Image (tube, grey):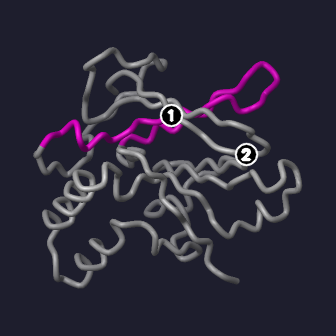
Amino acid sequence: MDKLKLKPAKIPWSIAASASFLTTHFDEKGSLQHLTVVGNFWMHAGDQLSAGHVEVAAEPEAFRPAMPNEKALYQLVRITFTGLIEWICNPAYSESESIQESKYDKSLVPIRQAYEKWRAGIWNMPDVQRFKMDYLKDTGFDSSPRIYEVLNSPWLEASVAGGNELKHFMFVGDESVVEVLAKGWHWELGQPA
């Protein structure tokens, strides 16, 4: 079986791996209404090369839209779907992997090349962090957002509802992974987390 190819979302933030509050919200009929996640907004850190982790993360309050000029490294984000047909939520694959890495082709994920250099001993971790910041400055997008479109999805191929407009999206938290079949999604910035 071919690996499932992951295409990263083009957004200026990532789901914070260290603050695992990927929360599902439902309407009165039990249908998925939206997700809330803690987003890591590297561009709000300026030129600081932070390790990008939270020592102690308290569960965030209920989502509220961010006020003008309300910017922090970690902020709540609400993700809403258009044309949502199906969804699943699974626990993390293991203690060390949110998803079963061996099942996925991450060749389209920019940070992958930096981590390969780090694993080979060519780069150290500050080099990886610098790559991440430079990529964000150069493109306006996070190099590993933890939100993907699954390009060769058997789940999508098996679904006939929604026709060719549907896409398979994956939202990867530290402790859980939410996957949806939908036409699209959008995000709204919330308060600092």
Q: Position of residue 140 (x, y in %)?
A: 31, 49
- The boundaries of the magenta stretch are 19-46
- Check if mark 1's residue and mark 2's residue have beta carbons within 8 Å: no
Q: Going 41% across and 27% down the picture, which residue do you hit?
A: 189
Q: Which part of the image, by quadrant, shows the C terminus?
A: top left
- Magenta highlight on residue 36: yes
For image coordinates 69% across by 36% down, the residue present is 82
Q: Report which quarter residue 2 is drawn in.
A: bottom right
Residue ID at (47%, 36%): 37
Q: CA distance from mark 1 to mark 2?
A: 17 Å
Marker disc for residue 113: none
Compared to 192, does 91 lie above or below? Answer: below
Q: Let me know if residue 161 is in the magenta part.
A: no
Mark 2 sits on what residue? 87
Amino acid carrying label 1: it is Trp
In the drawing, does residue 110 fall left or right of residue 95? Answer: left
For the N terminus, give its image quadrant. Answer: bottom right
Hey, what amino acid is under mark 2?
A: Trp
Labels 1 and 2: the sequence-earlier one: 2
- 184 displayed left or right of 77: right
- x and y percentages locating residue 30 in the rendered image: 78, 27
Q: Secondary structure at mark 1?
A: strand
Numbered disc 2: secondary structure: strand
* Residue in front for this viewpoint, 61 or 73: 73
* 65 lies above or below 171: above
Q: Position of residue 91 (x, y in %)?
A: 60, 51
According to the picture, the residue beneath numbered tag 1 turns out to be: 187
- Which residue is painted at 24% across and 48% down in the image? 52
Q: Position of residue 147 (x, y in %)?
A: 50, 52
Q: Is residue 120 above or below residue 137?
A: below
In the depicted view, which residue is nearer to us: 12 or 1?
Answer: 12
